[in-house]
Amino acid sequence: MSAEQLISFARGAPSLDIVDIDGLKAAAGRAFDADPAGVTAYGTSVGYVPLRRWIADKHRVAPEQVLVTNGSLQADAFLFDHLVKPGDAVVVERPTYDRTLLNLRQLGAEVHPVTLQPDGLDTEELRKLLESGVRPRLAHVIPNYQNPAGVTLSLPKRRALLELAAEFGFTIFEDDPYADIRFRGEALPSMLSLDTAGVVVHASSFTKTVCPGVRVGYLVGEVGLVKEIAARATNLYISPGMVAQAIVHQFCVSGDLDRSITTVRTALAERARVLAESLRKHIPGVRFTEPDGGYFLWVDLPDDAAVDALVPAAAQRGVAVVKGSDFLLDGGEHALRLAYSAVTVDQIDEGVRRLAAAIDEVRAG
């Protein structure tokens, strides 16, 4: 592998070799054959109705509780726009997805980061924040294989968070696109499925299980909330993309989705394992929690390895990484997010070698 060839740990997207191209082509043909009028029409703001029904069945909710969107980021944006006003308090994980921080800050929210532990959000820290008088409008949580930290919210903490939301009157936004990409352990119940107080709004996506290009995500919530957001969606774009949603529906009902998930899980499990081995081998003093699923691994580097200098030094060696500080309001100057989803196994060790060389240069400088 030439030094000039870029090895990217920057993007949370599956590499082409694990995308079911043939399955998607066949699903597209079936979609146009089965429902040419539905595929080619404007549709409705709630999304492609058969896919909406399939998602409702998956989550054991009424179809009226589901809104199918152009990717889960749009679902996030709809919910934030609907619930958050300038000055509203919002709880986020520390660290959290960089676009979550961007969207909330653009809305003028008062963002309260709560520490992320190896078993997820520190619910005791959150309780102390609430008891201090902070009254958040919502808490944004990525419970499974979190982006960027790769950790999973434990079952006791899921229950504790639900209790806090009911007690203090805030919405839990369960942002859950990675749940099906599990390598180890038992699947934990979603907070949506555990919710008896109507405090959870759930979002997910087919980006990580089918492919990013379909841009199909969804929101699950109380009927009234979904109806109000759907009305805003109608005014914004009439309807989301029917063609993509109809293809995803055919991909799901045929069993191709289950096969695709198996492919992605198997490939990413090996990549995560090899990445962890390479980090331990080539970068002494590095600290990380090896993920049980998902796309990301968070790395804490030695204190003399500043990522502001490291990222360009790594880029000069043909390896792309993302600064930990991008996922925090403050801090993260000695941390990186590594996405192992788009790198093949034969690239990983070489990528970590290049990263190690860049770290040595920065520390020496």
Image (spheres, helix red, strand yellow):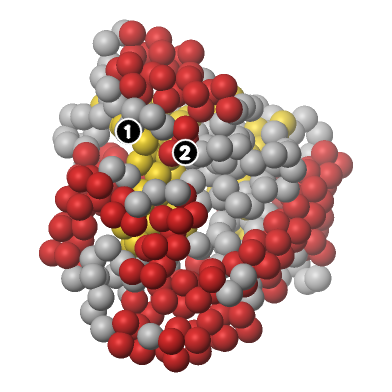
Quadrant of the rendering where the C terminus is positioned: top right
Q: Is residue 363 visible?
A: no
Q: Secondary structure at mark 1?
A: loop
Question: Does the CB distance between marks 1 and 2 fall below 8 Å?
Answer: no
- Which quarter of the picture shows residue 201? top left
Q: Residue at x 57, y 22 (%)?
A: 156
Q: Position of residue 111 (x, y in %)?
A: 32, 30
N-term mark: 1 or 2: 2
Q: Nearer the viewer, residue 256 or 235?
A: 256
Q: Is residue 330 above or below residue 347?
A: above
Q: Which residue is mark 1?
A: 198
Q: Is residue 273 above or below residue 50?
A: above
Q: Residues within 10 Å of mark 1 (few under 14, many from 20)?
A: some
Q: Residue at x 56, y 37 (%)?
A: 189
Q: Nearer the viewer, residue 121 or 285?
A: 121
Q: Position of residue 287 (x, y in %)?
A: 72, 31
Q: Is residue 326 above or below residue 70?
A: above
What is the CA distance from the residue labelled 1 to the residue labelled 2?
A: 10 Å
Q: Is residue 115 above or below residue 145?
A: above
Q: Position of residue 28 (x, y in %)?
A: 49, 85
Q: Disc 2 residue type?
A: Ser
Q: Is residue 331 left or right of residue 309?
A: left
Question: Tag on residue 193?
Answer: 2
